[in-house]
Amino acid sequence: LGKNLYFYETIDSTNNELKKMAAEGACEGTVVIALCQTEGRGRRGRRWQSDAGSGIYMSVLLKPDLPPTAVQSITLLASSAVCKVLEKYVKSGLGIKWPNDILINNKKVCGILTEMTSEPDKVQAIILGIGLNVWNREEDFGDELKHTATSLCLNTDREISRTQLVVEILKELEDLYLNFVEKGSSAKFMDIWRCFSVTIGRDIIVIQGENRWQAKALDVLDDGRLLVETPDGKRQTVLSGEISIRSC
Ligand code: BTN
């Protein structure tokens, strides 16, 4: 990954740019990085704060020979890879909230936006967008984010280089991705994911559009679905949506 790497000072969104490149035939492993995004996008149509110099804004093109359902696994694979890198910097409090929010002491430090183009039964391209808050100070987060977001520099004693972080993340991603596509097994990254999970075993609220319901998170299946139990004892899986963790 990253043999073809395009670096921009300012761009609307690295995911948008890589999507265009994918449509023009860019090869697997192409990476787009920007110092600043003017229209950084988060999940569910939200904006991703992308100030110059604060974070890593990066998108990676993957073309696995897999059905479209694999996209959820790739998302979990990516959060596992980022956590493997961040654990070298952060002593405690690092966790993943299903499906792919990386938290430090319950505040979000990294988000992953996975977008896909596909044929009916085959992935054409997966655009894996990673936004990691690195140098943000508390006052850089506006009112909306100041209680829910954090950055790496606020949580580490180690020296930080964004270039080094990018190299380490791409290396971990490549390792887990090749293991997944070559062995056809998600065991390796799911072990890491479960190890960092702050979701499994917790009482949660599942948010799906306007719908909100309570459940207990029991496990995450290898295909990325969340297995939950509702208060009436019924078990079901959640494929997409968002959760919030209920504090006791
Ligand atoms: C989330 O909502 O948690 C996902 C945030 C993803 C942000 C990254 S930054 C690089 C890439 N380009 C975008 O426009 N979004 C993703």
Image: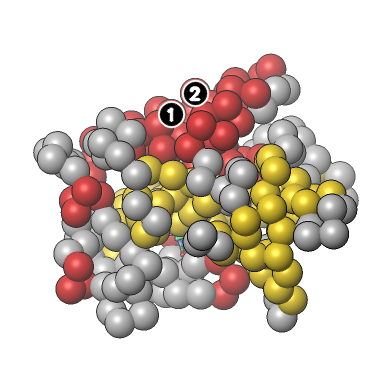
Q: Which numbered marker is on residue 193? A: none
Q: Is residue 31 left or right of residue 123?
A: left
Q: Residues within 10 Å of mark 2 (few under 14, many from 20)?
A: some
Q: Which residue is mark 2?
A: 175
Residue that carries the numbered disc 1 in the rendered image: 172
**Residue 21 occupies quadrant:** bottom right
Kind of residue at badge 2: Asp
Please state which of residues 8 and 146 is positioned toward the viewer in this rendering: 146
Residue located farthest toward the top when viewing the structure as drawn = 183
Report how far apart the C-alphas of labels 2 and 1 lie in the structure. Answer: 5 Å
The kind of secondary structure element at disc 2 is helix
Instruction: Please tell me in which quadrant of the rendered image residue 231 appears.
Output: bottom right
What residue is rendered at 30% in x and 39% in y?
Answer: 92
Disc 1 marks a residue whose amino acid type is Glu
Q: Is 95 positioned to the left or the right of 134 in the image?
A: right
Say if mark 2 contacts mark 1, CB within 8 Å.
yes
